[in-house]
Structure formats: structure tokens, C-alpha cells
Amino acid sequence: FEGTGRACSGLLKITPKRLSWKTPFSSCPTLAFTLAERRQEDGTTRWVYRRVGAPKSCFYKLVVLKKVVSPDSSIAWNVTGFTSMQAYKASSDIRLSCYLVKLD
């Protein structure tokens, strides 16, 4: 996936065992992750990834990927980074939310 906009330019890459997300405000190495949550309701699917062993330079330790399928079948992808699971559950304002373009 490729991020759009000044704060979100960069790449999000998720493989079966590793995740990397690089933005101008947080550069994280490719790390293992655990799938903390997967939820589907209506046309929205949400995956919550917790990075394993993230260094301090990796500001967003929890990554939420959201796929929204609208009634006209268009698909929108969004990613939101949180500093922790606690920040995610509290819907903290300290986060980065980005619209994504899926690369083929």
C-alpha cells in the first residue's frame, strides 16, 4: 500500500509474518507482528496489528488497517497508527490516520 498526503507519504507492507510502515514521522524496520483483533461489520473489515519488539524510533506500535466496501462496490483502504493498544482502545488523539492506495 502507498500512503497519500504529506504526513502519510510512504509505504505499508504486510506479509504473513512481517509488517513495515514508513512515513515521514515514523520509520520502523520490518518487524514481526501479532494480529490483536480482526473485526467485520457491514462493509468494513478491520485488522489490528501489534508490532513485536518495536524500537523507540517506531512511534506507532499498533497499526489498524481498515477496508471499506461501499454499496457501489468501490473499495477504500485506510491505516491508522497508535502508540499502544491502550491508546487504540481509548481512541487517543495521538495517532496518524492515512488514506491508502493498494499497489498491485
Image (cartoon, rainbow, N blue to C red):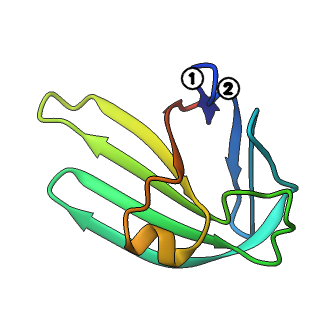
**Is residue 9 toward the left or the right of residue 89 in the image?**
right
Kind of residue indicated by mark 2: Ser
**Residue, x 67% and y 65% (percent of image)?**
61
Residue 51 percent coordinates (x, y): 71, 71
Indicate the quadrant where residue 7 lies: top right
Residue 90 percent coordinates (x, y): 38, 71
Quadrant position of the C terminus in the picture = top right
In the foreground, 90 or 102: 90
Image height check: is 12 above or below 47? above
Crowding near the residue tagged with mark 2, few <14, some 14–19, many ≥20 C-alpha atoms within 10 Å: some
Indicate the quadrant where residue 55 lies: bottom right
Give the residue number, with chain letter if any, for mark 2.
Answer: 9
**Residue, x 66% and y 58% (percent of image)?**
60
**Residue, x 74% and y 70% (percent of image)?**
17
Crowding near the residue tagged with mark 1, few <14, some 14–19, many ≥20 C-alpha atoms within 10 Å: some
Q: Are marks 2 and 1 in contact (CB under 8 Å)?
A: yes
**Is residue 83 toward the left or the right of residue 33 in the image?**
left
**Residue found at the far top of this picture:** 5
**Residue, x 74% and y 39% (percent of image)?**
25
Q: Is residue 41 visible?
A: yes
**Dot label at residue 4:** 1
Quadrant position of the N terminus in the picture = top right
Rounded to the nearest angstrom, the CA distance separating label 2 from label 1 is: 5 Å
